[in-house]
């Protein structure tokens, strides 16, 4: 194992070691990894980065960055240091870290729903790790502090009784065993962790005051010691339940807050769409009213014209029955009648020549037939045109007389 950092180095040395560790390992996102590591060691100064080999259950070994040290655990008015190792995968932050509780010789792991007998930590935060939603090392360590405060992962091993009599807590919750003097390698953190409650207002790490010496007498001494143990146990359970309930309420509040915020955003978007639709519907209704007004005016005009037409037809109904339309356009003079017939014949000859050309274009007749018929029709048209000119001259003379 190769260690980069010791407790005696400054923050600048730690940051330099973080950069060296990230450069040594094939990190997929080295900038993000270095940023999260620097932020974590700057807030939790008892955590030290190192490069070491992590051994999986199948025996495979991989080099990883490890944050080794202690994290603060507020418990019953005091702050204790819990030794942990946080292993960072090479594809961090896409993969959640591995957290192990590493007890000293004087400590023993207390298995619970978040810590197994080997010290492996299991949290919903690790199980639901999502890098895109801002999951990082600082939030992980803060949640570890809260969970450990609710359910301490370690307790003191039973030892020989010291010269001064004191109550033993081998069967009690682990708070009595968390003596800071039992961790010579770890000191009290200098910065305040960002957890659900204000740890800055907690008391500095200190050893719980020893209980008063038991009174003389066998029965009274045992009864007094059991009474103190029972009261201490009830206080520990009460503090644990309060911390756990507070943490659960904050988690549920965050879930409901995120859910309702998403619903409010969706409703706000729908409101904007409805307002825009209302404006469009108002414009359409305005245009419909204008069209309706124009249609009403047109209908009134049609009714007026219809009445005028009916009056005209009723007045001229008898005249239309007595006078035929064809007779109205027939010329009375012989010259004009002859001119009208010649004009109709000329138009018919023009139509015949046109359709002959169409038949030739569609290969219905050949060129010889086309030329022969066109020549015949052209002669007739010439004679008709000449006769029309003579009739026009005669009509002009008649009009002059």
Image (cartoon, grey):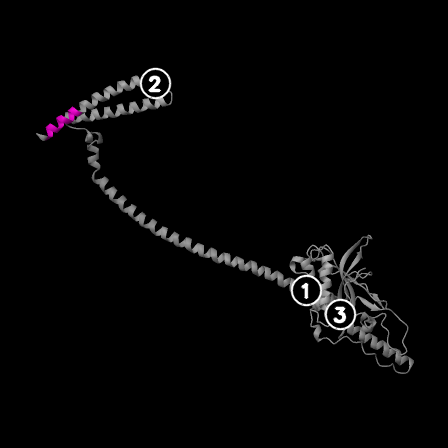
Q: Nearer the viewer, residue 108 or 46?
A: 46
Image position, residue 327 (x, y; %): 20, 29
| Residue 245 vertical position relative to residue 63 in the rendered view, above or below | below
| Quadrant assignment for the C terminus | top left
Q: Which residue is mark 1?
A: 251
Q: Nearer the viewer, residue 50 or 398?
A: 50
Report the residue that reaches farthest toward the left: 401
Kindly indicate the quadrant of the structure image that contains residue 258: bottom right
Image position, residue 38 (x, y; %): 70, 64
Q: Which residue is mark 2?
A: 367
Residue at image coords 91%, 82%: 217
Which region of the structure is painted magenta?
389-399
Image position, residue 333 (x, y; %): 14, 27
Q: Secondary structure at mark 3?
A: strand
Rate crowding at label 1 as few (under 14), some (14 to 19) or many (20 or more) other CA atoms within 10 Å.
few
Q: Earlier in the sequence, mark 3 or mark 2?
A: 3
- Residue 73's tag is 3
Q: Nearer the viewer, mark 3 or mark 2?
A: 2
Q: Secondary structure at mark 2?
A: helix
Q: Secondary structure at mark 1?
A: helix
The Cα–Cα distance between marks 1 and 3, rounded to whole angstroms, is: 19 Å
Rate crowding at label 2 as few (under 14), some (14 to 19) or many (20 or more) other CA atoms within 10 Å.
few
The Cα–Cα distance between marks 3 and 2, rounded to whole angstroms, is: 114 Å
- Residue 114's tag is none
Q: Is residue 391 magenta?
A: yes
Q: Earlier in the sequence, mark 1 or mark 3?
A: 3
């Amino acid at each position: 194992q190769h260690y980069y950092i010791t407790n005696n180095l400054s923050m600048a040395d730690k940051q330099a070691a973080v950069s060296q560790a990230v450069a040594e390992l094939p990190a997929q996102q080295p900038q993000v990894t270095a940023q999260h590591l620097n932020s974590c060691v700057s807030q939790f100064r008892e955590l030290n980065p190192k490069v070491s080999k992590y051994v999986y259950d199948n025996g495979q070994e991989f080099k990883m960055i490890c944050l080794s040290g202690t994290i603060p655990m507020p418990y019953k008015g005091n702050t204790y240091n819990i030794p942990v190792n946080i292993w960072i995968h090479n594809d961090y932050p896409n993969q959640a870290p591995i957290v192990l509780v590493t007890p000293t010789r004087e400590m023993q792991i207390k298995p619970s729903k978040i810590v197994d007998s080997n010290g492996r930590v299991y949290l919903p935060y690790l199980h639901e790790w999502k890098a895109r939603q801002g999951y990082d090392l600082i939030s992980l360590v803060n949640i570890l502090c809260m969970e450990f405060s609710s359910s301490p992962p370690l307790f003191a091993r039973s030892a020989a009784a010291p010269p001064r009599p004191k109550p033993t807590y081998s069967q009690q919750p682990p708070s009595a065993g968390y003596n800071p003097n039992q961790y010579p390698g770890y000191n009290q953190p200098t910065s305040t962790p960002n957890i659900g409650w204000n740890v800055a207002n907690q008391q500095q790490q200190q050893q719980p005051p020893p209980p008063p010496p038991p009174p003389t007498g066998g029965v009274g001494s045992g009864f007094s010691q059991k009474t103190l143990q029972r009261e201490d146990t009830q206080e520990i359970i009460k503090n644990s339940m309060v911390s756990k309930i507070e943490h659960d309420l904050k988690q549920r509040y965050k879930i409901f807050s995120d859910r309702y915020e998403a619903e409010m955003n969706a409703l706000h978007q729908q409101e904007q769409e409805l307002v825009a639709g209302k404006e469009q519907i108002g414009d359409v209704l305005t245009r419909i009213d204008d069209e309706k007004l124009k249609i009403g005016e047109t209908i009134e005009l049609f009714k007026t014209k219809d009445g005028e037409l009916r009056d005209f037809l009723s007045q001229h109904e008898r005249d239309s029955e007595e006078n035929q339309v064809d007779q109205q356009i027939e010329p009375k003079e012989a010259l004009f009648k002859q001119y009208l017939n010649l004009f109709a014949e000329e138009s018919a000859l023009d139509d015949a020549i046109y359709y002959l050309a169409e038949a030739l274009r569609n290969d219905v007749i050949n060129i010889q037939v086309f030329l022969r018929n066109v020549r015949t029709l052209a002669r007739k048209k010439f004679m008709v045109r000449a006769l029309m000119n003579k009739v026009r001259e005669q009509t002009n003379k008649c009009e002059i007389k």
